Amino acid sequence: MVKDGWRMEVTRRGLPPLASLPGVADGRHEPGLDDWLDAEDIPDVTPFLISPELEYDVDLNGYFLRPALAGAPGNTRLAAARDISRFLDFLSRCRGGCGWRDAVKADWEAYWYWRHRDPAGSRVAGSRWNRELSMLSRVYAWAARQGLVAAAAG
């Protein structure tokens, strides 16, 4: 099942426990989401990304749990997730379903063209591009340090 594109969601406390939903209760008690978020020290409004195939990539979403980002203001965390999601959508839709781990220099160049020149692209001004590129560069540098990609892409 393929959805439109990458989705950004955020953590939030206060949701009803899964076992309380109709058709789910089976008598087992499992810790609630709030307990898990507290135990993992994950703040509310921590973004996470879901692929078009509705998959959760533990490695990719680990980026949002880095102390430097987890402790940042909510709007900074959300902006980071939007920037990453936009690039992942581009890879998925315009680069033959390329995964984030497989992006190469040609993908980055095509993304630059799509963001700056392509009439069908989502064109942006230089300052916004610089912010996006800076964010994506940090993601790939982090991923390279974690051994998730061969080298920082771009």
Image: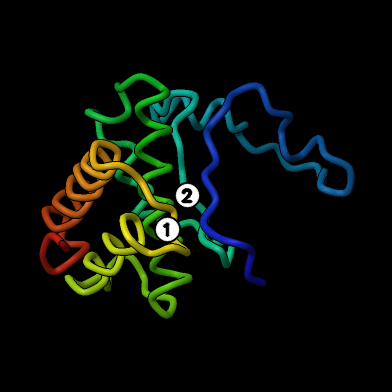
Q: Which residue is mark 2?
A: 49
Q: Residue at x 37, y 57 (%)?
A: 87
If the image is split into quadrants, where does the C terminus sit?
Answer: bottom left
Residue in the foreground of this view, choosing between 33 and 110: 110
Answer with left or right where residue 64 lies relative to residue 47.
left
Q: Are marks 1 and 2 in contact (CB under 8 Å)?
A: yes
The earlier-in-sequence mark between 1 and 2 is: 2
Q: Along the line of sight, which residue is nearer the eye, 9 or 90?
A: 90
Depth check: give the residue in front, 34 or 145.
Answer: 145
State the colouring used for the structure image. Answer: rainbow
Side (left or right) of 9 relative to 96: right
Mark 1 residue crowding within 10 angstroms, few (<14) / some (14–19) / many (20+): few
Where's residue 70, x and y in %?
Answer: 32, 28
Q: Toward which corner of the image does residue 116 lie, by quadrant? A: bottom left
Judge from the rendering whether residue 65 lies leftward or rightward of residue 31; answer left or right.
left
Give percent across and percent down for residue 21: 83, 39
Q: Is residue 92 above or below residue 74?
A: below
- Residue at x 53%, y 32% (from the top left corner): 11
Residue at point 70% right, 37% down?
29
Q: Quadrant of residue 63?
A: top left
Q: Disc 2 residue type?
A: Leu
List the single residue furthest toward the bottom.
96
Alpha carbon of mark 1 to alpha carbon of mark 2: how far? 8 Å
Q: Which mark is residue 57?
A: 1
How many callouts does the rendering have? 2
